Image (tube, helix red, strand yellow):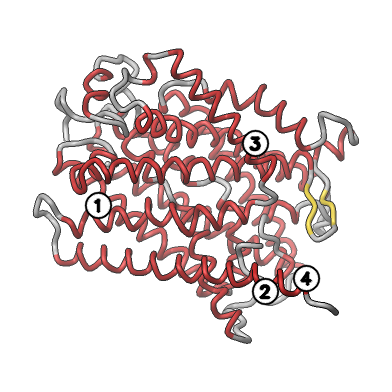
């Protein structure tokens, strides 16, 4: 079984969004822009990073073991910072303030179009993952014939609005639609603050329960290194890389957040602060989540919080963890949706007026995207299918392959030898790990098909 089952002061002509220079110039007079705070930027970028991926990280420790798993998690975080720093540096050299602008400067219009297409696929996949997890939490999920009840089922019983489709529909209409109606990312800084706080609540509760059980001697020694029994288990180790990469991807929101900063030169510090904060959350969650559930850790660790945890008030703690993280994802949703909507509009209407100034286009795109996410969450069975697809393909492109390619292209002659070496390493690791992960999952699918079709 593979894991797939389981960005200088700005001139008027500088691009102010992920779209194009012409849009930037039209939008430059918008009074809602260029007044964002440092704190708001850190919160919004942290919210972009800490999403559904945190729920999958304990399971990666189960596959890799704690020592290689935590080491790889730190390495991916460092490479993420390097790739974002590349983007910020080359956008300054190219005198553009967008990821798409850097790609167009390096590879022409095809480069920008390819990037926007990848961001659209990546963010759409992430939003579907979020909605799947929200559905799992509030309405429950079934795995291998075992049904894990949702909080609404536990509290109110089974009826049309506690079932998955009804609950997701009401959540979309009553909560998500109002949140995605904001037209500027800095408007989401307060919801982002609440979202980050709720993620911390999850980490604190998980760590607290684990420490209590450690003191009582109820936790067994975890696996420190992977258990490689055969060739299949060796190739399976590479399937965790897309999950970790997906957990750190934030590149598509770096420039929009920088564009709304009162002092855009602070963006480097914003990135450092956000990545350091999120890495600490990831390490803590991975460590204590795996310690708490051991080999019973599920691909979505939230599903483990529906049984007796072996501590007082277990049922209450379970509900607090699941509800708080479901609300966290609901508040992260509009931040990711902002990037999705902006890039789709830039790809479909590259010469149109800025999206925030065109209410009709804004409403139509927003409604269409929400509808697609809702349908995707209804028909895709679990988060690992979406994680594996986005993580092993578009996520590694957006996070590592495209930034590395920009450095190697070096259209402005600013790349140092060290930069080119790092870029080459990033690209090589991304391509190799993605190829192995995808191949491993394809092999596993065919193996399962053969196992089912073969006679006993």
The answer for how far apart the CA atoms under marks 3 and 4 are is 29 Å
**Where residue 452 is drawn, which disc sits there?**
4
> What residue is rendered at 44% in x and 40% in y?
120
Q: Position of residue 379 (x, y in %)?
A: 69, 43
Residue 76 sits in quarter: bottom left
Query: Image check: 392 left or right of 295?
Result: left
Whole-percent x, y for residue 29 in the image: 25, 15
* Above or below, comparing residue 352 to residue 125 in the picture: above
Q: Where is mark 3, residue-wise?
A: 375
Estimate how packed mark 1 is, as few (under 14), some (14 to 19) or many (20 or more) residues with alpha carbons within 10 Å.
many
Mark 3 neighbour class, 10 Å CA radius: few under 14, some 14 to 19, many 20 or more: some
Q: CA distance from mark 4 to mark 1?
A: 48 Å
Pair 4/1: label in front: 4
Q: Above or below — where is 284 with respect to 112?
A: below
Identify the residue at horizontal 39%, vertical 18% (top origin): 356
> Which dot, 2 or 3, sits closer to the camera?
2
| Numbered mark located on residue 447 in the image | 2
Q: Earlier in the sequence, mark 2 or mark 3?
A: 3
Q: Work out which quarter of the rendered image holds the N terminus and state it.
A: bottom right
Q: Residues within 10 Å of mark 2 (few under 14, many from 20)?
A: few
Q: Is the residue under label 3 in contact with that under label 1 (CB below 8 Å)?
A: no
Can I make out residue 6 in this image? no
**Among numbered discs 1 and 3, the one appearing first in the sequence:** 1
- Residue shown at the point (67%, 50%) measured from the top left: 205
């Amino acid at each position: 079984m593979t894991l797939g089952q389981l960005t200088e002061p700005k001139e008027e002509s500088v691009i102010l969004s992920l779209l194009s220079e012409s849009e930037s110039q039209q939008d430059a007079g918008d009074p809602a822009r260029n007044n964002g705070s440092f704190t708001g930027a850190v919160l919004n970028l942290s919210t972009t990073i800490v999403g559904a991926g945190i729920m999958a990280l304990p399971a990666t420790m189960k596959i890799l073991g704690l020592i290689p798993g935590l080491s790889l998690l730190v390495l991916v975080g460092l490479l993420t910072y390097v790739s974002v720093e590349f983007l910020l540096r080359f956008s300054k050299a190219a005198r553009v303030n967008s990821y798409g602008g850097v790609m167009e400067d390096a590879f022409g219009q095809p480069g920008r179009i390819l990037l926007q297409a990848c961001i659209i696929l990546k963010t759409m996949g992430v939003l579907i993952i979020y909605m799947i997890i929200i559905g799992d939490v509030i309405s429950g999920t079934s795995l291998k014939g075992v049904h894990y009840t949702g909080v609404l089922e536990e509290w109110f019983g089974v009826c049309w609005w506690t079932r998955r489709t009804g609950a997701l529909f009401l959540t979309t209409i009553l909560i998500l639609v109002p949140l995605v109606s904001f037209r500027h990312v800095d408007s989401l800084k307060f919801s982002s603050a609440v979202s980050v706080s709720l993620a911390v609540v999850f980490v604190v509760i998980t760590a607290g329960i684990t420490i209590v059980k450690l003191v009582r001697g109820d936790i067994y020694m975890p696996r420190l290194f992977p258990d490689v029994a055969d060739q299949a288990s060796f190739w399976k180790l590479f399937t965790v890389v897309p999950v970790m990469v997906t957990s750190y991807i934030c590149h598509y929101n770096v420039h929009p957040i920088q564009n709304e900063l009162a002092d855009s030169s602070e963006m480097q510090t914003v990135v450092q602060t956000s990545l350091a904060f999120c890495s600490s959350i990831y390490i803590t969650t991975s460590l204590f989540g795996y310690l708490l559930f051991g080999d019973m850790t599920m691909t979505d660790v939230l599903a483990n919080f529906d049984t007796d945890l072996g501590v007082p008030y277990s049922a209450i703690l379970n509900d607090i963890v699941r509800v708080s993280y479901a609300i966290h994802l609901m508040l992260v949703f509009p931040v990711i949706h902002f990037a999705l909507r902006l890039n789709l509009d830039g790809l479909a209407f590259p010469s149109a007026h800025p999206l925030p100034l065109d209410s009709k286009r804004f409403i139509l795109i927003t409604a269409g995207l929400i509808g697609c996410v809702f349908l995707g969450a209804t028909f895709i069975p679990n988060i690992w299918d979406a994680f594996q697809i986005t993580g092993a393909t578009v996520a590694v492109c957006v996070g590592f392959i495209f930034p590395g390619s920009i450095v190697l292209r070096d259209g402005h002659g600013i790349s140092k030898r060290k930069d080119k070496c790092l870029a080459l390493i990033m690209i090589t690791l991304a391509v190799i790990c993605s190829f192995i992960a995808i191949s491993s999952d394809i092999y596993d699918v065919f193996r399962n098909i053969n196992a089912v079709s073969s006679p006993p």
